Amino acid sequence: MTAKSVIAPYKIRLPQNIYFGAGSLDNLAVEAKRMQVRKALIVTDQGVFKSGLVQPVQEILSKASVSVDVFSEAEPEPTLAGLAAAAKKLSLNKYDVLIGLGGGSSIDTAKGLSVLLAFGGDEQDYIGTDKIPAPGIKLIAIPTTAGTGSEVTNVAIFSDTEKELKVGMISDNLLAKVALVDPVLTYGCPRGVTAASGIDALVHGIECYTSNKSNSFTDSVAIRAMRLISGSLKTAVNNGSDKDARSAMAEGALLAGIAFGNSSVAAVHALAYPLGARFHVSHGNANGLLLPHVMKCNVPAAPNKYADIAQILGERTDGLTTHEAAGAGINAVKTLIRDIGIPSRLSDLNIPEEALEGMAVATMDVTRLLANNPRTLTLDDVRGIWRDAW
Ligand SMILES: [Fe+2]
C-alpha cells in the first residue's frame, strides 16, 4: 500500500449512530424513543412500497407509539421539480423525523424534504455547498439497496430538468441522525438494481481512494470497502439469496459511503451526471460504464494507487511494473462490469455520437468533483474519455 511519511490532518463527518447487520432495523424503536419521535414520515418510492418493505418499518414505529405517514412517490432519479411538488404537498404536516427508506433516490428526497419542510423557500436556494443554514427536520436513513452511501453522506443529488444538469445540496446539515443498514432489506433487491447500485459503491471506493482529498482514515475504510464489494458483487447479482454476499455488499457500500463522504468522488461521477441528466441512464449504470475509461486516463497521475487497487480487487501483481499492475486493475473492473451485466459502451445505450461534445462541455462544469480528480482534466482529456466509452 502507498505509505505517507506524515499523516495529514483530516475531518470526519458521520451520522450520530450507525447500525449495521442483519436485524439492525429493530433498533429503529430504540432510536425513535431516544429521539422522542411522535410523528414520522416515511419517504420511499413505488418499488420499495410494492416490495412490502414499508410495512415492517411502520410496525416498529407503531409499537413505539409513533404516528406514521407514508410518502411513496420519490422519483427514481429525483428532480428538483418533483422535490418542490412533494414539499408543497406535505407542507401542512408537522413531522419530528423523516425516514428515508430505499435507494439513494428515496434518501436524497428525504434529505431535500428535511430542508424544504423546515425552512421553506425555493429548492434552488439550497443548491451548492454550505447553503443550508441549520439542520432541518431530523433524518433517519434506511437503505434497501447496497450502493448509494447516502445514509452516511452530507450530499443530496437532484436533476435540474430545465438545465439538463445534476445538482447537489452539500452541507453537514444534511447528515442523517441515524443510519440503519440492515442487509435483510436488500435480500429482495432485483438483479439489475443490485448490479447498478453495487457498481456505484465500487466506484465510490475507487474514486475516494484516488481522490485528491483522500486521507489516512478514508483510505483505510475504502480499502475494506473495495475488498468486500469486489469479493461479493458478482455473487449478490447472480444469486440474490446468498446472505453472505448480501451482507458483504451492504457493509461494503456503507464503508464506501463513509469513505467518499469524507474525501470525495471525482471524474467518474462528474461524467455520469450529464449522462444521467440528458439520457436518463441510471446513476449506477452510468458510473459503471465510465469507470474503466476514467481509470485509464487517471493512471499516469496516481500510478501507485491504481496499482494498489489491482491488489485490493484480488489481482496478482507479482512481477508486474506499477503501470502493468494498474492495467490489471482496470481489466478486473472491465471483467466485473461484464459479468454483472452493466452496459459497457455508450453506443449500446443508443447515445448518439453527436451528443459526446455537449456532454464533454457539460462535464467540465462539474468543477466541484473534477477538482478532486487525481489528474487535472482538460476539455480534450474529457472528450477522449467520452470517445473511449462510446
Ligand atoms: Fe454514486
Image (cartoon, rainbow, N blue to C red):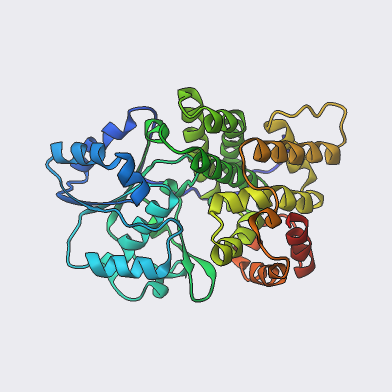
Q: Eyeballing the image, is 179 above or below 369?
A: above
Confirm whether residue 214 shows in the render.
Answer: no
Closer to us: 24 or 49: 49
Check the picture and name the quadrant holding the C terminus. Answer: bottom right
Q: Position of residue 333 (x, y in %)?
A: 70, 39
Confirm whether residue 97 shows in the render.
Answer: yes
The quadrant in which residue 122 appears is bottom left
Q: Position of residue 266 (x, y in %)?
A: 63, 56
- Tell me if 166 is positioned left or right of 103 in this view: right
Query: Residue at left 45%, top 66%?
Result: 130
- Tell me if 141 is positioned left or right of 232 in this view: left
**Which residue is the extreme one toward the left?**
65
- Tell me if 328 is positioned left or right of 347 in this view: right
Query: Residue at left 33%, top 28%?
Result: 23
Closer to us: 148 or 355: 355
Q: Eyeballing the image, is 256 above or below 273?
A: above
Q: Position of residue 382 (x, y in %)?
A: 74, 64
Query: Residue at left 79%, top 40%?
Result: 326
Query: Residue at left 27%, top 32%?
Result: 26
